[in-house]
Structure formats: structure tokens, C-alpha cells
Image (cartoon, rainbow, N blue to C red):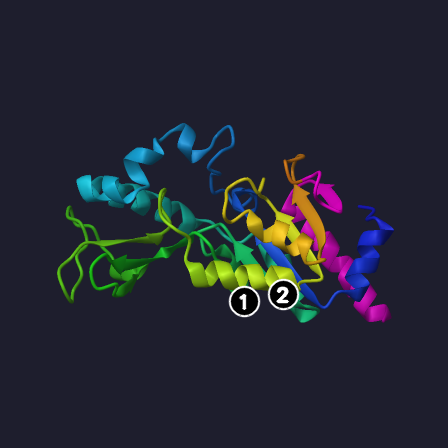
């Protein structure tokens, strides 16, 4: 692939890079997106499963759904895009700000990650907020309960109507504002407030690069749009970086 000279020049000068990632990069690992033609919410109603009231009405149903999603995530593997992002830490100060809950960035080796929508491998008590990892949770025909206080345990994901974890969002936004290049990967960036991350980066002077399989609402704001699969494009960018750093 031939990259724009302006983009390559920015790579040469860059020190801090942020990757703002969404469901598209996970889809390349076999995890369904939420809003595509085969998206999760085309099959299930969010109001029945992904909000606190629904959980309190029927916690067993919600847990069975998330256990099914966990099984899918556990079978998935980080793809070449995830791995390229992790390897770019050898050349830049890299921060990942992700809307994904699948933990694939961490499994690929990325170190600095801010998870805006939680992590499906974590759970917490709705009363005392004791945390449990997925290995500690079994259903056995009943809803998991906290060992300390007996209250319900829920997945540590952001449901509809809930606020994003403020520290994760603030730190992610700060990283974006300090970045030299902000890559937007596998997301249409239309879900707010998460979508403020690339906007904040651009307003602060970062070079905004979009990597998506097709144009999005963000395309008109990006300095550079590269259309194709992240698992193809990001390894090629990594190879360009290796050439640049080797030469310099």
C-alpha cells in the first residue's frame, strides 16, 4: 500500500500516538459488531439485556447472555491489527483508548489501555463493589452472588443509561490531547461521549488518521483516511515505521 507523504512525515516526527478503537477491529477476530448488518442489536433488543433495570428484572437471562458473549470472546484471538498496535510500543509512546470490552488489546500485549465501556472479563458486586474475574464466576442455574455481602454480581460493562467510567474517559481524553497522531480504528465514532476522544485530539493539534473498511461520519474530519481492514493496514504501517526508525 502507498501511504501519503504527509502521513509518513507525521510518523517520522511523532512521539506520542493514540489508537481509538471500536468494534470493527474486533470483528476481524470474529466478534460481532453492534451496528453492522450482522450486528448484535439486530438480533437482540438492548432494552431487554443491556441496562440495569433489565438486569434486576431478570438477572439470570442477562447473565446467560453475557456468558454466551464471554464464550465467543474467549475463543477469539487478537488479530494482526491488535498485534501491530502492541508492537508499535517499541517505537512510540502508545496509548489505546477502546470502546471494546473484549480484552483483546491487552491479550495482544498493549500496556497502556483505557477501556471506556468496561471489560467483559471483569465483574463486580452491585452493593459493595467487590471485583471478581470471569474465572471466579459460575452460573450453575443461579445468578452469581457476592461472597462478602450476598448481593448480585454483574458484568463490569457500561450499560445503556449508565455513565462511562470517568477516570478512564478523562485519562483517555488527556492522552488524545497530548498525542501527535490519533488513529481512529474500526469505529464510526458516532457514540458519545466516547466519540469526543478523536475530536479532542484534533482540536488539540493531533494529526487525525482514520482506518475503517468504508467512509464514516468521521471521514470529513480526518486529515487522512485509509480504507481497508485494520489487520492488513496496521501491519503495513508498522513496517513503514520500522523502515523510518531504522533509517533515522
**Left or right relative to 155: residue 172:** right
Upstream in sequence: badge 1 or badge 2: 2
Using the image as rendered, state which of residue 2 and residue 190 is in the foreground.
190
Using the image as rendered, state which of residue 164 and residue 98 is in the foreground.
164
Q: Residue at x 59, y 64 (%)?
A: 175
- Which element is circle 1 on? loop
Question: Residue 187: x and y, percent?
Answer: 57, 43
Q: Quadrant of the C terminus?
A: bottom right
**Is the residue 53 above or below the residue 177 in the image?**
above
Which residue bears the numbered disc 1?
A: 112
Q: Characterize the local packing of mark 2: few (<14), some (14-19) or many (20 or more) Cα atoms within 10 angstroms.
A: many
Mark 1 in CB contact with mark 2 (< 8 angstroms): yes
Tell me where the magenta segment starts and ends, as one range: 219-248
**Is the residue 205 above or below the residue 91 in the image?**
above
Q: Of helix, strand and loop, which mostly describes the magenta segment?
A: helix
Residue 177 image-quadrant placement: bottom right
- Which element is circle 2 on? strand
**Is residue 57 visible to the viewer in this orientation of the structure?**
yes
> Is 230 part of what is drawn in magenta?
yes
Q: Characterize the local packing of mark 1: few (<14), some (14-19) or many (20 or more) Cα atoms within 10 angstroms.
A: some
**Left or right relative to 179: residue 121:** left
User: How many tags in the picture?
Assistant: 2
Q: Residue at x 80, y 69 (%)?
A: 245
Which residue bears the numbered disc 2?
A: 94
Q: Residue at x 78, y 60 (%)?
A: 11
**Is residue 80 visible to the viewer in this orientation of the structure?**
no
Question: Residue 124: x and y, percent?
Answer: 27, 59
Question: Residue 38: x and y, percent?
Answer: 48, 30
Amino acid at each position: 500500500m502507498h501511504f501519503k507523504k504527509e502521513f509518513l512525515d507525521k510518523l517520522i516526527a511523532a512521539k506520542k500516538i493514540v489508537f481509538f478503537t471500536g468494534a470493527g477491529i474486533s470483528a476481524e477476530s470474529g466478534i460481532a459488531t453492534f451496528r453492522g448488518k450482522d450486528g448484535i442489536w439486530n438480533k437482540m433488543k438492548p432494552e431487554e439485556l443491556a441496562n440495569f433495570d433489565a438486569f434486576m428484572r431478570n438477572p439470570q437471562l442477562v447473565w446467560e447472555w453475557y456468558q454466551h458473549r464471554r464464550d465467543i470472546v474467549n475463543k477469539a484471538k487478537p488479530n494482526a491489527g491488535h498485534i501491530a498496535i502492541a508492537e508499535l510500543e517499541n517505537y512510540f509512546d502508545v496509548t489505546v483508548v477502546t470502546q471494546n470490552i473484549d480484552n483483546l488489546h491487552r491479550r495482544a500485549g498493549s500496556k497502556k489501555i483505557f477501556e471506556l465501556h468496561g471489560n467483559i472479563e471483569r465483574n463486580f458486586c452491585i452493593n459493595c463493589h467487590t471485583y471478581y474475574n470471569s474465572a471466579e464466576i459460575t452460573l450453575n442455574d443461579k445468578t452469581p452472588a457476592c461472597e462478602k455481602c450476598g448481593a448480585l454480581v454483574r458484568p463490569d460493562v457500561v450499560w445503556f443509561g449508565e455513565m462511562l467510567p470517568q477516570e478512564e474517559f478523562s485519562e483517555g481524553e488527556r492522552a488524545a490531547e497530548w498525542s501527535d497522531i490519533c488513529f481512529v480504528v474500526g469505529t464510526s465514532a458516532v457514540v458519545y461521549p466516547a466519540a469526543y476522544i478523536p475530536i479532542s485530539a484534533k482540536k488539540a493539534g493531533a494529526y487525525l488518521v482514520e482506518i475503517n473498511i468504508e467512509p464514516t461520519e468521521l471521514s470529513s474530519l480526518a486529515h487522512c483516511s485509509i480504507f481497508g481492514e485494520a489487520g492488513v493496514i496496521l501491519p503495513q504501517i508498522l513496517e513503514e515505521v520500522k523502515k523510518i526508525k531504522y533509517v533515522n
